Structure formats: structure tokens, C-alpha cells
Amino acid sequence: MEFGGQSVASFAPAIAGYAIRTPTSARVAINVSRYLDPIRRAPFPCGDWPMNQTNRTYEVLVVDDSPVYRKLVEQVLASEAYSLLFAGDGAQAMKLYEEHSPCLVITDWMLPDFSGFELCQRIRSDATRPYTYIIVMTSNTEKCNVVKGLQAGADDYLTKPFDSGEMVARIGVGRRIIDLNRELAAKSQRLEEAARTDPLTGLPNRRAIEEWASKQLRGATRHGFPLWVAVGDIDSFKTINDSFGHDAGDIVLKTFADLLRKNTRASDICGRLGGDEFLLVLTHVERAHVQATVNRFREQFASLSFPLQGQSVRVTASFGVAGVENKDVEGFGSLLRKADQMLYEAKRAGRNLVCLSLPPSLP
Ligand code: GH3
Ligand code: MG
């Protein structure tokens, strides 16, 4: 007996329920001079703000109870472009699908536990995942099932025994659709990120911080962990613009942003509210340590020296802080207003200061 020109005996049985895959990650660093080259524009187009790259490998789930067919498909797709997963029945297929979200599923029509029809329906009912291109394999005698399969959400079909050239061609069609879907998803993600990112500093903008902080605040109220909102505003910033120009002002803003970003833990967030005003949301910092934590930002910024127009210029910032502890119920808007009042106090008291409004402590 032969499949695709090769004898069945030459195939070792492919193991069902097995996978092969690889992921990656990266990060950034700070220094004032990086902003001094006027040609360089926003150094953080999207900052550390998460942005997935389009992944060009194709994860393929092959579903067939026949080890011979699994092996056949494995040989047809023997290329680095494919990362293969194998399932021998519908339940195993769904488990692998949920774990790996493959972009392509090639499934037999008749499975030991459920039909290809049901598998298509189950995959299509999950709208939270990226698009999965589905190819159903049917035998000649099951051709009436093609219509059913397409109605259930399959994109294409192959008739068994299949020709390997035809399979490659049909998978090629699938890849074009998958690529288009990936490009669309990447574009909409970029748009979404741009709508939440401050273009000058690459930090989250007011909208993004408000959304994140409101969510964290609900968690703080529910679980009783401390959450602090610190508003930082550069002192006499107009003087920088007036004395050294707008570009110099931008350098100061980007440096301040970078300092915040570098010192913000993964569990916290910092962002630009607008103008020379920045926001820092700190969670899980005890009241005894919050003043010192924010003060460190103030000191670090004040210690920097900006080489502007042949001069070494020092700039400072003032901070206002307010927070919740012990399941206090408080909206983000109200916390921000309190922090703003404290910032005003810091400015009034002479600038280059941190002023803190502590929530009432428990008896
Ligand atoms: P204070 O110590 O009271 O904060 O005084 P200030 O001079 O810093 O006053 P204020 O905070 O009101 O100044 C904000 C200035 O920031 C006004 C505006 O021209 C400038 N600004 C706003 N956005 C930008 C920007 O993107 N780049 C630059 N270079 N300047 C900006
Ligand atoms: Mg200011």
C-alpha cells in the first residue's frame, strides 16, 4: 500500500499529543546624552509598553487517529517554517489547541471521539484567539461531508489519499490568509498602543494610566494592599524652554520619563499626564516607606546634569503623593486630586520636595 508515493512500511508511527516550540524577550537602558542628538526622534516609539512582533512560524495541529497519516503530514511539512503538534482524537486536539493556539489545523473528518464537524465548531466558538485556518481531510466516500465541514467553519478540504503537492499548495493558501490576519492584528495592536502612548516619551498616556490604575485600585480595595499615586511636576520648566529652547525642554522631559521608567517595578506603572506632569502608581509599598521611595526619584533627577548650550544645567521636580491602605474605598480621580493638592503644597513650600497625604491609619 502507498501514500504520496511512499510505502507505509517506511514510516515509523508518529506520536500523538506531542509538540515542538520556541519563544523570546528583550529590554532597554538610560542616560542623558542619548537625548542630545537632535536628529534622533522619540527614542522609545512605544517604550517598554508591550508590543508583540508578528511571529512568522506556523504552528500546525495535525489531528488524525492514523499514525500513518500523521507521519505523512509530518513529512510533507518537514520545514523550519512549521512547528507541529499531533493529536490522535478530538479531546487531545482540543487540549493542544487550547494550550498552543495553532494557526493551522489539519483534521481528519472521522475521529474516535467526535467528528471533524464538531472540532471545527468548537474551534470557531472560541473568538478570543487569533484566526485558525482549518483544513478538513475526508475520504472520497465522505465527500458529502465537505459541505458540512465548510459550514461548520472549515476553510478548505483535502481528499484522502491526498497528493503531497496538493497539500503543500492548499497549506500555502492557508499561510496567505494567516499572514493577512497576523498583519491586521499587528496593525490594530499598533493603533491601540499608539492611542495609549505618549509619543514624546513612549510612556503610557493619561488614558492608559487611568485604566490600569482604576483596575489596580479595585484590587487594592478588595485585597487590602497599599496603593500610592505620585504626581511629579518639573520645577520652573518654562524657564528651560525659554532659556534653551523647546528641544532642550523635550530632552529634560524624556530624561525624567526614562528615570521613572527605569525605576518602576514590573508590578507598577508610570506615565505622562501631559506637559511636564508625570504620574507614578506604586503598589505594595508600606506607608513607612512611600516617602523615601518617591524621594529617591526626586534625588536622582536633581542629581542629573544637562549639558545645554555649553552650560551644565540642573533641573528639579516636585511630587505630591496620596494613597489608600487597608481596603479603603476611593476612586482614582479622587486620589489624583489629593495627590495634585500635595503637589501644589510642595510647589508652595519651595519646590524640589515630596509632600504626602496619608490615609487615616487603622486604630
Ligand atoms: P512650576 O515649577 O510651578 O511647575 O512651573 P513651570 O514653569 O514648570 O510651569 P508649568 O508646569 O505650568 O509649565 C509647563 C510648561 O511645559 C508649559 C509648556 O509650554 C511646557 N510644555 C508642555 N508640553 C511640552 C512639551 O512636549 N515639550 C516642551 N519642551 N515643553 C512642553
Ligand atoms: Mg512644572
Image (cartoon, rainbow, N blue to C red):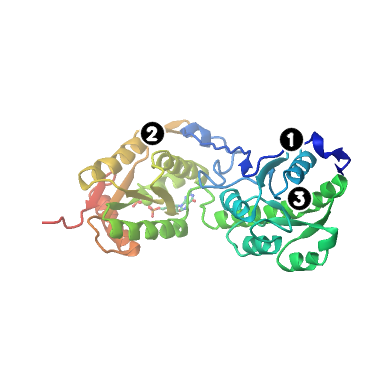
The amino acid type, in three-letter code, at marker 3 is Arg
Which numbered mark, 2 or 1, is in the foreground of this view?
Answer: 1
Q: Nearer the viewer, residue 340 or 153?
A: 153
Q: Are there few (<14), some (14-19), or many (20+) residues within 10 Å of tag 1? A: few
Quarter of the rendering occupied by the C terminus:
bottom left
Element carrying mark 3 = helix
- Quarter of the image for residue 6 reads top right
Residue to which mark 2 is pinned: 304
Residue 303 x/y as whole percent: 34, 33
Q: Are there few (<14), some (14-19), or many (20+) residues within 10 Å of tag 3? A: some
Q: Which mark is residue 303?
A: none
Whole-angstrom CA distance, mark 3 to mark 1, is: 28 Å
Element carrying mark 1 = loop
Residue 8 x/y as whole percent: 81, 39
**Which residue occupies 70% across, 50% down?**
65
Residue 125 x/y as whole percent: 61, 65
Residue to which mark 1 is pinned: 12
Tell which circle, 2 or 1, labels the residue nearer the N-terminal end.
1
Whole-angstrom CA distance, mark 2 to mark 1, is: 66 Å
Label 2 lies in ligand 2 vicinity (Cβ under 8 Å): no
Instruction: Give the vertical position of 275 relative to 316 (above or below).
Output: below
Residue to which mark 3 is pinned: 175
